[in-house]
Image (cartoon, grey):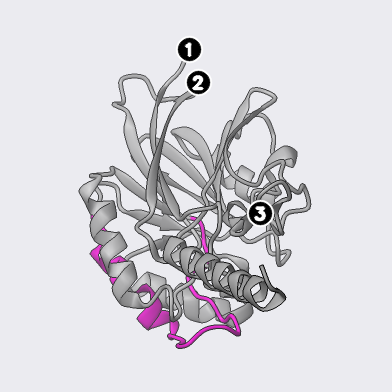
Amino acid sequence: MTVRRFLLLMVALGMALLGWSYWSAIADPVVREAEVALADWPAGAPPVRALLMSDLHVAGPDMPPERLARIVEQANALRPDIILIAGDFVSDKRASTSSYSFAEAVAPLAGLRSRLGTVAVLGNHDHWRNAAEARAALTRIGVRLLDNDAAAVGPLAIGGLDDAFTNHQDPGAMMSAMRALPGARIVLSHSPDPFPALPGDASLMLAGHTHCGQIRLPLIGAISTMSAYGDRYACGLIRENGRMLIVSAGLGTSILPLRLGAVPDMWLVRLGPGPR
């Protein structure tokens, strides 16, 4: 093979890899499932199907509002009892072909349907853009936003931790608010990094932020997880010291509209009683 043919082959392979990575980024999210037994589940309360969504990153070309609307339809078809959104509603990446206001970005979420409603926290991109605008836009469409606070929703006491990546978290305030409420305690956070420091009565945490690496190279792994713990809390279901953490790969992208080895996903988690 001549040098010229070899270079052309490398260019072709590179273009094919870019095409595959973009196709992966815009694919319908995989629905992953888990079942979590909570020791503090209220007596007699039926199980709850919670859908975790994260890192929507609404921006062109990969996540225009029209794509998010299709994902909302997919989410509704799962018939969740409650929907939990772990932040990063917008994206201002340099590779964006179009940008949307918070109102435009979250408008499709008004179509979400669940018996107990939708609860959310903010992410680092929301704070970088304008947290006040994010709060206003989410409130207008009926999403309940938790900001180092907690809410009693059905059989759940949900603690919402504000973004740790931008240092807006206050786990003490959140835990105090959550402990004052009836129900099984779960924590919703954008970043998984606060997980090891949470007290033992926060037995389940749901998060996003890492994108499961977004681009994971063979033999090398993730280029970055944006976590102080590297791969430790980068992806999936993690059990540690009798507690559980679920980290979603998210729906959109950051920096580049590409995914490799880390497809978009949502988690459908069945929450119910555990041993007493």
On the image, the x and y values in percent for residue 15 come to 54, 73
Q: Which mark is residue 275?
A: 1
Q: Secondary structure at mark 2?
A: loop
When the figure is inspected, residue 238 is found, relative to residue 1, above or below; the finding is above
On the image, the x and y values in percent for residue 112 come to 27, 59
Q: Is residue 105 magenta?
A: yes
Q: Secondary structure at mark 3?
A: strand
Residue pictured at 71% horizontal, 59% vertical: 224
Are the residues at dot 2 and dot 3 in contact (C-beta closer than 8 Å)? no
Measured in 3D between alpha carbons, the distance from the residue under mark 2 to the one under mark 3, in whole angstroms, is 39 Å
* Tag 2: amino acid: Ala
Residue extending furthest toward the top:
276
Q: Is residue 121 magenta?
A: no
Are the residues at dot 1 and dot 3 in contact (C-beta closer than 8 Å)? no
When the figure is inspected, residue 147 is found, relative to residue 114, above or below; the finding is below
On the image, the x and y values in percent for residue 96 come to 52, 84
On the image, the x and y values in percent for residue 80 come to 28, 44
Q: Which residues are magenta?
A: 86-113
When the figure is inspected, residue 211 is found, relative to residue 7, above or below; the finding is above
Measured in 3D between alpha carbons, the distance from the residue under mark 1 to the one under mark 2, in whole angstroms, is 6 Å
Q: Which residue is mark 2?
A: 39
**Mark 3: few/some/many CA within 10 Å (<14, 14-19, 20+):** few
Please tell me whether the stretch drawn in magenta is mainly helix, strand or loop: loop
Sequence-wise, the earlier of marks 1 and 3 is: 3
Q: Nearer the viewer, mark 1 or mark 3?
A: 3
Residue 111 visible in rendering? yes
Q: Which mark is residue 217?
A: 3
Relative side of 236 to 169, left or right: left
Q: Nearer the viewer, mark 2 or mark 3?
A: 3
Q: Quadrant of the N terminus?
A: bottom right
The residue closer to the viewer here, 90 or 152, is: 90
